Amino acid sequence: MVKMRDLWSAEGDRAINAPQPVRVSKGWDVAPEVLPAKPLAPRKRKYIHVKPNRREAVPLPHPGQSYNPCDDDHQDALRITVRQLERKKAEHEKFVAKMTRGCGKPIKGNSSTVDKTLVEEQRSGQASGKGDVVPQAENVKQASNEPGKKNSKKKKKKKVSKASLQAAKKALPHRRHPKRDVVVREVDNFHELAKAHAKKEKIRAAARERRRSIKRDGLKVKTFGRHHYSPVALDVAPSQQLVGSLRHLNGGSVHFALDRMKSFEERNLVPARVPRACNRKKVLKPKGDVRLKRETFGVVPDTTF
């Protein structure tokens, strides 16, 4: 079995600049947190809470997603994908069958609802095989040319009473015959009306553009805590550029890049950042005993690179 490596206590393998023990006298190395506080130091709070880091130092890839997966994982991933594609294909075929149901069948039903000429053509075609079917227009033409037969279908004249005609004349006269002087006045003032309309449309267009810009800004601005940031594509910048460029990122982007930097520092791939005043929270605590809630990372697995 490969010997496990502890990044946090092994000599020469520390990934972060942890506080070193202070040599009080010969043979006495004391942890810095148990040393007495300076009497003139500013008062601080009782607890200093450090959030534990639960992230794996070397995240394992999901099955079927790695560049060189195991054969079983690869086959499982392929099986799942093929099952999904087959299900989608079956749903598509079912939908097509539902939409095209009954397209190839002959037309059946009552002759009053179905086109009569179509029914006659079908019947004559069934009786005589492939007989010549006379088109409908020629049938009508022959029937009209036959002597002694008058066209029975005449246009029926609609009977309208005198009272209804008078009521129609009196109904809605302002719609049928608008007042002539009003029309003339509106025609004379057409340019003023067009100018007022254009002014109103300009105000409406400006308000519409203002609303759209506010909506665009609302879609663009995101919040991460108290930071406003525009989302960035993660894991794009190369690692060697991320070491010193965190301070130049937006507030919301720092969280993700800092997470990635911590992972690099844990694996000893980049030099650890020195904890300075700018990246350390100043928390006040009272004088006296200090209970320090410390981070515990545990043992990190040996990497292959």
Image (cartoon, grey):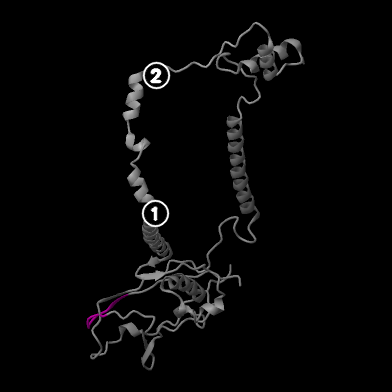
At label 1, the amino acid type is: Phe
Above or below, comparing residue 285 to residue 99 in the picture: below
Query: Mark 2: few, some, or many residues within 10 Å (few <14, many ≥20)?
Result: few
**Left-right relation of 13 to 211:** right
Taking the spot 36% from the left edge, 46% from the top edge, the residue there is: 183
Question: Magenta span covers which residues?
Answer: 284-292
* Label 2 sits on residue: 160
At label 2, the amino acid type is: Val
The picture quadrant where one finds residue 124 is: top right
| Closer to the camera in the image, 211 or 56 | 211
| Closer to the camera in the image, 282 or 143 | 143
* Label 1 sits on residue: 190
Taking the spot 57% from the left edge, 75% from the top edge, the residue there is: 238
Mark sitting earlier along the chain (2/1): 2
Taking the spot 41% from the left edge, 63% from the top edge, the residue there is: 213
Which corner quadrant holds the N terminus? bottom right
Q: x%, y% of residue 107?
A: 62, 19
Q: Is residue 71 magenta?
A: no
How many marks the image carries: the answer is: 2
| Closer to the camera in the image, 67 or 257 | 257
Element type where label 2 sits in the image: loop
**Residue 121: in sight, yes or no?**
no
Main secondary structure along the magenta-highlighted residues = loop
**Left-right relation of 136 to 187:** right
Element type where label 1 sits in the image: helix
Q: x%, y% of residue 283?
A: 29, 79
Q: x%, y% of residue 24?
A: 35, 92
Q: x%, y% of residue 153?
A: 56, 13
The picture quadrant where one finds residue 178 is: top left
Cα distance between the residues tagged 2 and 1 = 41 Å
